[in-house]
Amino acid sequence: MWVVWMRKEYFKNNWRKLDNVAKVFSMDDESNTNTFRYSVILKQNVNKNILKKALDKSLERFKSFKVKFGTGLFWNYLEYNSKEAIVTKEDDIPCQHIKLKRNNNYLFKISYYKNKINLDIFHVLTDGVGASKFLKSIVYNYLNLKHKLKNNEKEENNIISYSDQYLKNYDPNIKFKVDFKMAYQIPGRVHMNTNNTYHYIVDINNIKNVCKSYGATITEYLTAVYIYAIYLSLYKKKTSKEIVIKIPIDLRKHYQVDTLSNFFVCSNINSKIKEKKLTTFKGILNQVKCEFKEKINKEKIREYLSRDVTVGKNVLIRTIPLPIKKIAMKLIFNIASMTSSSTLSNVGIIDIDNKYKKYIDNILVLVMPGKKEKLKCTICSYDTKLNITINSNIDDTKFERTFLSILKQEIENIKLESNRNLIK
């Protein structure tokens, strides 16, 4: 009886269920890693020993990240990880499948190279908002130790919960439709374990002025540029399928909550190039603006939330044993991934406390392309810079060159950084 009670007490205090979307992400494999990266570019080279101390200090506050995978009968779960988190020198391409055994079973990986600190993180653990908070904590602690700065007591005492807000906020009575209409798929041979990266860095005020002239938001404008570049460079005109871009939506501001767990939904923005016979950038931008207005609003977001949670709570899915569920979920995931051509994610402004800004040059966000979505785009802004990052796993660079040429028509002084050669 004592052993049973001790085991019960241990699991009550040392494990937790996966949130709604983490259940799907937990079915990943090396072809769809569901891993993304935040990189902070410092103005001085990184000291590994200080970075390790900073990571340990941050994990004292972000206890919900000090976990590893557990395998249950019906779902994976997270449990306390007693091993030490490690820091490594960057020696691989970004956003690859995290080798858990080599990483002491942690679902995130901290690496460095020269003046860069990387956080690769498995989407099971958190989304972009949670990853940003965690990395900022590590960087703040690093700079405090390196330059003997005072800790921010307000930051230290700000405890963020790791609560599943999906279940708390969805409405089971809301009706929704699941659209499995197939979208246009980017052509090209996929090279697994390849992540060709292109950073287009622009002055944020310049792009704001361009967007203002079109009466569009930055996300709307860049979604239209993205679609137009695909249309000009990769779209096979004889196809009947439309270019559809998946847009992740952070739900925290819509429900006035803060959590370190995943809390987002996605909306598919349809270019309707075929349906409306669109051939110009302005025509595509007007269509994108209409789609955003129609599909990204309070009512639609409530539908998306109920849609995603209802699928996760389905009795049939819940009661299927995990090995069979993995096969079924991967099949569903593969079908769902064909309903969009690519994903564009704008994580927004990454705020840094003023006293640390003089040590930081830039912050970048990257994702891993997949078998279906061979191109992916992430956008973030830091200080005066807007960073547009394209990730690809195909050889053809027509899209990247076209994307750059479209931007250059209206935006001056674009800085391009890449791990591949690209004709400018």
Image (cartoon, helix red, strand yellow):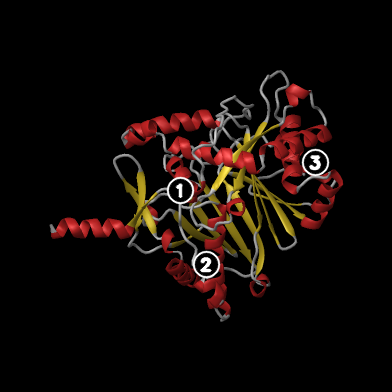
Spatial separation of the CA atoms under disc 2 and disc 3:
37 Å
**Marks 3 and 1, Cα distance to the nearest angstrom?**
36 Å
Query: Mark 2 = which residue?
Result: 138
Q: Residues within 10 Å of mark 2 (few under 14, many from 20)?
A: many
What x and y, as percent, mark residue 87?
Answer: 45, 63
The numbered mark, 2 or 1, whose residue comes first in the sequence reads 1
Counting from the top left corner in percent of width and height, residue 24 is at: 45, 40
Find residue 382 and report its horizontal and vertical position in percent: 69, 60
Query: Which of the marked residues, 2 or 3, is nearer the chain's N terminus?
Result: 2
Specify the label residue 405 is tagged with.
3
Say whether residue 155 is left or right of residue 399. left
Q: Secondary structure at mark 1?
A: loop
Which marked residue is nearer to the observer: mark 2 or mark 1? 1
Q: Element under label 3?
A: helix
Q: Quarter holding the N terminus?
A: bottom left
Instruction: Check disc 2 and report its element: helix, strand or loop.
Output: helix
Q: Is residue 332 visible?
A: yes
* Up/down of 342 relative to 99, above or below: above
Q: Residues within 10 Å of mark 1 (few under 14, many from 20)?
A: many
Query: Which residue does the image show at 68% across and 45% down from the upper left?
Result: 421
Q: Residue at x 87, y 47 (%)?
A: 213
